Image: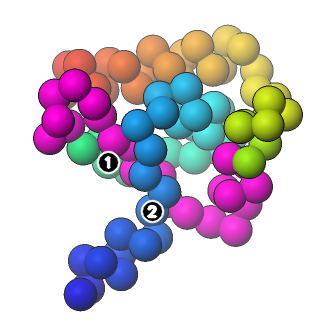
Amino acid sequence: MKKLLQEKNYFKSPDIALCSALCCLGYEIEAINKQNPARAIFSIKKDEQLDELIQLYFTHQLKVEPLSFFNALREIKTRVYNA
């Protein structure tokens, strides 16, 4: 039961681009689940702004600095493939 409560505190997504954009905004990937070798699931700790930022991302209104996005994406890929 305690583990279930802790999981509610995290947003989980396989969308690497979304997670890269969130990292540009100061969020950190707390864990990467690689149980399925074809698909990694990223966990980001929730806060009061996260849902709004995700909505902005999916409505193409979220703005991030391009070089920061590329660097975040590269770092995440390194974590997925080298860890």
Local SS, label 1:
strand
Question: What is the spatial separation of the Cα atoms under label 2 and label 1, in whole angstroms?
Answer: 10 Å
Q: Specify the quadrant of the image occupied by residue 33.
A: top left
Q: Does residue 15 appear left or right of residue 24 in this picture?
A: left
The total of numbered circles placed on residues is: 2
Q: Residue furthest bottom?
A: 1
Q: Is residue 29 visible?
A: no
Q: As shown in the figure, which amino acid type bears the numbered disc 2?
A: Tyr
Q: Quadrant of the C terminus?
A: top left
Residue 67: where, in percent of width, then height? 67, 12
Q: Quadrant of the N terminus?
A: bottom left
Q: As shown in the figure, which amino acid type bears the numbered disc 1?
A: Ala
Local SS, label 2:
strand
Residue 42: where, in percent of width, then height? 38, 43
Residue for badge 2:
10
The residue sitting at 80% across, 30% down in the picture is 60
Query: Residue 31 shows which numbered tag?
Result: 1
Question: Which comes sooner in the sequence, label 2 or label 1?
Answer: 2
Count residues near mark 2 (Cα–Cα under 10 Å), then give few for <14, some for 14-19, many for 20+: some
- Range of magenta residues: 34-54
